[in-house]
Every structure is written in structure tokens, then in C-alpha cells.
Image: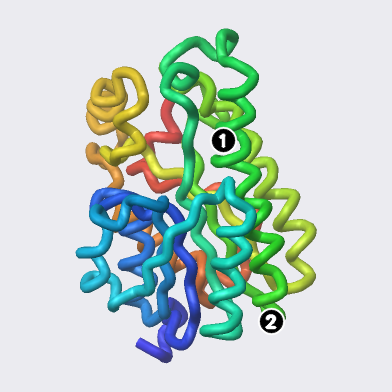
Amino acid sequence: MSNSPFSLQGKVALVCGLANRESIAFGCAQALHQAGARVVVTHMPGAERFVQDLTGDLGDAELMPCDVQDDAQLAALFAHIASQYERLDVVVHSIAYAPPEDLRGRLVDASRGGFLMAMDISCHSFLRMARLAEPLMPTGGTLLNMSYLGAERVVENYALMGPVKAALESMTRYMAAELGPQGIRVHAVSPGPIRTRASSGLKDFDTLADTSEARAPLRRLATVQDVGNAAVYLASSAGAATTGSVHYIDAGDNILY
């Protein structure tokens, strides 16, 4: 595997946003580990009981609590990685949140506080991570975030998160341009509907998922393992000539209107 262009042997990866076995962060952490990377995984403080039994499937990955709205916790996370590993090759940002009352209503009715919170957690925290990761990537690296088709197209009931994900995708392109000369590549990964704890917060999500599954060219939904495999490609030398892109992992649903 070490001679494969998809190998991540000797690399260090940080995956943020682990909630449970069904979370996209789990699929990414597992795939990165299987490709040879040493993995550090974060979860929300207080969620240890939901994730502590998952480390066996992640190569005994190091689990750390981190609330991305707490600058001290975020700084401590990257300081620990610098001290323990002296480098960082891959960052996967799989974090999104909006207050339920704003997420389930109309976009025009979203509160200022809810909008700002959604942008801060789901979007700006990726910038903060990139800034902290940059010194640990002197010879290059890969930064990945998770988007959704609602960033570029109106998806019923996605409302507030549509503009937030659109900002995240635009930010991905600007960051790719700024960090590219240093060999740091930046991508957005756009999975189709996946039944995770986060997706359950969307109004009528099951209807959205069923519709996508029925109409997608491959007639199925993507899995967290599919997303993880895409993360391996993007982070490995196989994806060395790519940056600034949105990669759809949705069984082809994005090509349909």
C-alpha cells in the first residue's frame, strides 16, 4: 500500500466532528486510517460516551474534545498536534450547526443570532482551523470541508444552511488560491443526503433522502464510507493536481434538475 498513490502512510490527519458511527467524520477517519494515516479525531465536549467505543475501528485514533467556538480549545488542539506529531498533513472539517428554530423555518425569518452562529460554526471555523494548520504544513497538505448541493441550488427545507454552505464553497476557492503556492490544497466535498444525526435536524429529511435515492443515476444514496474514500483520494498524491474544487459524492444526483 505504501507504493500506492492512494497511500497516506506516515501522514497525520485531523478529523473534526465525530458524533457516532453514522457520522461522516467516522467514515473519513476510518478511511484515512485504512490508507495508513495516523488519525486524531475531535468530538464535542460531553459526547465521549457516544464515541469512545469507536477508536478500535479507527486504529486506536486519539480522541480529543473540541468546541470550535472556543478559541482556547481550538488552539490547544493544534498545539497538542504540534507537540505530539510535529506535523499535520490532512484536516477534515465535518462540522455544521444552526439553531433548530432557525433551521426549520424560512430563510427570511432567520434570526440574526442564528444566522451568525450557523456561519461561525459551519463556515468560519474552517478558516480558523486552516490558519492554525498552516504552520504545521511546511511542505504542503490538504484541507477538506463538507458541503451540500443546497449551496448552489434551492433545496426544499434546507433554507438557512444553503447560504452558509455557499459561503463555505466560495471560501474554499479563495483559500485554495491563497494557500496553493505553499502546496496546501483545499477542497469541498459535497455528499448527497446521508442519514446522520445532523441530517435528522432538517425538516422532512426522510422525504429528501427517498427522493434522491429514487432519482439518482446510480439509484442509491452515498454512504459515509463513500465520503471517506473520496477524502483519501483528495488527500493522497493521487489527487496532487487538484485544488479548489467541489467534489460531489451523491450517486450522480447533482447532474439532475
> If the image is split into quadrants, where does the N terminus sit?
bottom left
The one of 234 and 88 positioned closer to us in this rendering: 88
Indicate which disc residue 255 carries.
none
Residue annotated with mark 1: 165
Q: Residues within 10 Å of mark 1 (few under 14, many from 20)?
A: many
Q: How crowded is mark 2: few (under 14 residues within 10 Å), some or many (20 or more)?
A: few
Residue 232 vertical position relative to residue 249 in the rendered view, above or below: below
Residue 221 visible in the snapshot: yes
Instruction: Please tell me which of labels 2 and 1 falls first in the chain.
Output: 2
Tell me which residue sits at (30%, 25%) in the image. Answer: 205
Horizontal and vertical percent position of residue 126:
61, 51
Horizontal and vertical percent position of residue 169:
62, 42
Tell me which colouring the rendered structure shows: rainbow
Residue 157 vertical position relative to residue 169 in the rendered view, above or below: above
Mark 2, secondary structure of its residue: loop
Indicate which disc residue 139 carries.
2
Amino acid type, residue under disc 2 in the picture: Thr
Marks 2/1: CA–CA distance: 29 Å
Residue 252 vertical position relative to residue 188 in the rendered view, above or below: above
Tell me which residue sits at (46%, 46%) in the image. Answer: 248
